[in-house]
Image (cartoon, rainbow, N blue to C red):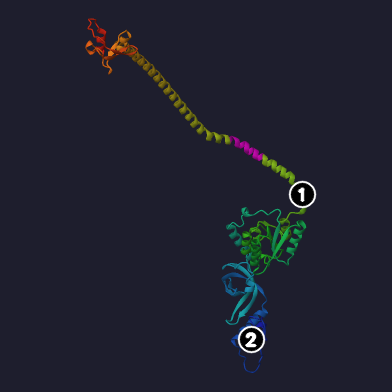
């Protein structure tokens, strides 16, 4: 600034004062008199503030971030410095809410804003409205890469977790702004290609503070409803700031946790967001998302015409596969059966052999027993024959000695009624009755005269001796 600015500050009273909060100008009385004008500290600071804000335009300042603090009100307080100097800086909540990430202490940045004076302390400060990292990537790229690395470490970007898009969804859910052209494009494409498909739309803000939370809430609500088979989330093109809601963690988590496959359709083909990386399918534009979600009716007709041939081929292939499995399985089945049956067959053969041996032993025992029985029978027959012969001999001898034999030779034996033998004439008295025993019976007799005789009756006496 030139000397005119200095003269304006101290040689003339400022015409207006700016309220630090409202920005309204306050009229100041210009009281010129012979007495020297005495300024209060507040007047001086207010004048300096007006001079700074009125004479210095908004500008870019480069430097290193130091002492970055986030206040509970949402404002950011920090210092911009280089190797020789530093400036106290502030970024109000409305501007800070657009930051993708807070810069780290020591980061080289360039900040856009205006200089002002904090009247209460007499300290001037830089009111920052925009901050960019000094490197080529900027804060947006840094925030993008940090979130991408964290989600990748959790496996949310892994290709193997991507779910296939259903070929013929009955209902498609769309999460986007209800007033945007992107919704009209998707509805037009889906209606033209598959007019039978039902579409459920859940509106949400797609840019600005809090947009990411609205998008995530809409996705969870639509997913929990159980009424959709596929979901599209996206918006039309815009700057990186406009698209930033789709680079925030709440949206990424909602896509990863969605119970149905998700197509991301954010911006144009060159725009790549975290939502695109987490989604099951990335569509370059909202219109392309509509095409990816449903199959064209003509394509469906072609597909249906080819179904019989594909079905027949599939059946033939299925039958052939099963035939090969059966053919391959028969040898394995035989080997398995052999492994299963062989030990049992061996045990059965061993049991058969033991049974045959037992039968043979039994037969041999029966044969030996028969031989023993035969020998015993022959021995018994011999013994019986010998006993019979002996008995016959004894019987002959007994017969020879028996009185009956004597009687059969013509002899008779006189007996008393009691059966006593009358051996001599002394036993006979005339008139005595007795019984005469002959060979074939008895004869009642009565003794007459008794005559002694000299006839030898040896046999009768012998018979008595033998008894």
Towards the viewer: 291 or 312: 312
Residue at 65 percent of width and 38 percent of height: 323
Q: Earlier in the sequence, mark 1 or mark 2?
A: 2
Dot 1 falls on a residue whose secondary structure is helix
Towards the viewer: 179 or 344: 344
Question: Could you tell me if the residues under marks 1 and 2 are in contact, i.e. CB atoms within 8 Å?
Answer: no
Q: Evaluate whether residue 24 shows in this view.
A: yes
The image quarter containing residue 153 is bottom right
Q: Which residue is mark 1?
A: 302
In the rendered image, residue 327 lying in the magenta stretch gets the answer yes
Towards the viewer: 330 or 185: 330
Residue bounds of the magenta highlight:
320-332
Dot 2 falls on a residue whose secondary structure is helix
The image quarter containing residue 275 is bottom right
Query: x and y percent of residue 207 in the render?
Result: 68, 67
Q: Evaluate whether residue 402 shows in this view.
A: no
Name the side, left or right, on which 436 lies relative to 78. left
Name the side, left or right, on which 44 lies relative to 447. right
Towards the viewer: 96 or 460: 460
Q: Which residue is mark 2?
A: 10
Above or below: residue 205 compared with residue 459: below
Above or below: residue 103 compared with residue 352: below
Residue at 49 percent of width and 31 percent of height: 348
Query: x and y percent of residue 156 in the render?
Result: 60, 57
């Amino acid at each position: 600034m030139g000397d005119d600015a200095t003269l304006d500050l101290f040689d003339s009273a400022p015409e207006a004062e700016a309220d630090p909060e409202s920005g309204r100008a306050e009229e100041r009385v210009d009281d010129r008199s012979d007495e020297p004008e005495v300024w209060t500290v507040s007047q001086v600071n207010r004048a300096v503030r007006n001079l700074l804000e009125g004479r210095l335009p908004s500008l870019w300042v480069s430097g290193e971030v130091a002492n970055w603090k986030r206040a509970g009100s949402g404002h950011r307080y920090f210092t911009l410095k280089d190797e020789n100097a530093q400036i106290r800086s502030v970024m109000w909540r409305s501007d800070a809410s657009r930051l993708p990430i807070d810069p780290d202490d020591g980061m080289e940045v360039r900040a856009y804003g205006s200089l002002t004076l904090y009247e209460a302390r007499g300290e001037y400060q830089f009111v920052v409205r925009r901050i960019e990292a000094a490197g080529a990537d900027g804060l947006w790229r840094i925030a993008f890469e940090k979130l991408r690395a964290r989600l990748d470490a959790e496996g949310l970007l892994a290709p193997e977790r991507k779910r296939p898009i259903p070929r013929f969804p009955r209902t498609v859910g769309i999460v986007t702004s209800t007033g945007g052209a992107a919704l009209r494009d998707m509805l037009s494409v889906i209606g033209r290609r598959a007019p039978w498909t039902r579409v459920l739309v859940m509106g949400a803000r797609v840019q600005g503070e809090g947009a990411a939370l609205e998008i995530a809430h809409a996705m969870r609500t639509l997913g929990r409803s159980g009424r959709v088979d596929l979901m599209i989330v996206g918006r039309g093109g815009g700057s990186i700031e406009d698209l930033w809601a789709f680079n925030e963690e709440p949206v990424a988590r909602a896509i990863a946790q969605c119970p149905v496959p998700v197509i991301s359709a954010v911006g144009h083909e060159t725009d790549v967001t975290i939502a695109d990386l987490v989604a099951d399918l990335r569509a370059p534009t909202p219109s392309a998302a509509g095409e990816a979600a449903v199959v064209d009716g003509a394509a469906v007709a072609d597909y249906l015409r080819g179904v019989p041939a594909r079905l027949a081929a599939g059946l033939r292939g299925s039958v052939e596969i099963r035939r090969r499995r059966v053919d391959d399985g028969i040898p394995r089945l035989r080997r398995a059966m052999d492994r299963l049956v062989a030990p049992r067959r061996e045990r059965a053969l061993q049991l058969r052999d033991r049974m045959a041996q037992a039968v043979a032993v039994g037969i041999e025992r029966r044969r030996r027993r028969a031989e023993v029985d035969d020998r015993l029978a022959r021995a018994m027959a011999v013994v019986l024959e010998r006993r019979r012969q002996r008995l016959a001999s004894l019987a002959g001898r007994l017969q020879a000695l028996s009185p009956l034999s004597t009687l059969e030779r013509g002899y008779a034996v006189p007996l008393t009624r009691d059966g006593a033998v009358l051996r001599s004439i002394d036993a006979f008295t005339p008139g005595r009755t007795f019984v005469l025993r002959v060979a074939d019976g008895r004869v009642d007799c009565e003794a007459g005269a008794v005559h002694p005789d000299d006839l030898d009756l040896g046999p009768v006496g012998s018979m008595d001796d033998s008894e």
